[in-house]
Amino acid sequence: MMFVMLVAAIGLVLTGLLAVAYGIGVQLSTGNTLIVAGMIGVCTGMIMLGFWTTVRELKNIAKRLGIGEETVRSHLKKVQVKLGARNRAHAAAEAIRQQLIP
């Protein structure tokens, strides 16, 4: 599943970049349509790569701690709520600001 998601994400990014490159050389509305479609493909691929990275990191954390992935997600969500953070990156920044982690 993870490999398929990674391949699909990379495929979307590459296809999107090709569409943008081809669209630049084409005149009128067809070129604009290709550029927009290519950018959507690139953005979708980048989002999928971000999800893939997040899931991989959760699995690594779970394996290191000897607990399940859902337990890791639950703990991270509780930390996020306690710190009043909007997301995990904000929680990490807030924990550093409050000197909870070095």
Image (cartoon, rainbow, N blue to C red):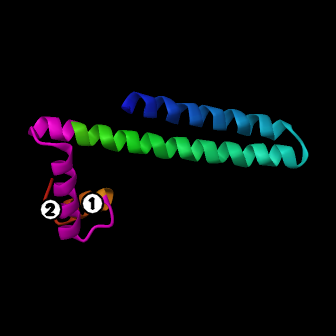
User: Disc 2 or 1, which lies upstream in sequence?
Assistant: 1
Q: Which residue is mark 1?
A: 93
Q: Which residue is mark 2?
A: 99
The stretch in magenta equals 60-87
Relative image position of residue 13 (x, y in whole percent): 58, 36
**Residue at the extreme bottom of the image, as rendered:** 84
Which three-letter amino acid code belongs to the residue tagged 2? Answer: Gln
Residue 61 is inside the magenta segment: yes
Using the image as rendered, state which of residue 67 and residue 99 is in the foreground: 67
**Left or right position of 75 against 28:** left
Q: Residue at x 51, y 36 (%)?
A: 9
Residue 22 is inside the magenta segment: no
Q: Residue at x 18, y 62 (%)?
A: 79
Q: Secondary structure at mark 1?
A: helix
Using the image as rendered, state which of residue 25 and residue 49 is in the foreground: 49
State whether residue 91 is above or below residue 41: below
Q: Residue at x 74, y 45 (%)?
A: 35
How many circles with numbers are drawn on the protein? 2
**Left or right position of 40 against 58:** right
Determine the main secondary structure of the stretch shown in magenta.
helix
**Left or right position of 72 against 27:** left
Which three-letter amino acid code belongs to the residue tagged 1? Answer: Ala
- Residue 3 location, quadrant: top left
Relative image position of residue 52 (x, y in whole percent): 39, 39
Quarter containing the N terminus: top left
- Residue 95 location, quadrant: bottom left
Q: Secondary structure at mark 2?
A: loop
Q: Mark 2 packing: few (<14 Cα in 10 Å), some, or many (20+)? A: few
Using the image as rendered, state which of residue 28 and residue 72 is in the foreground: 72
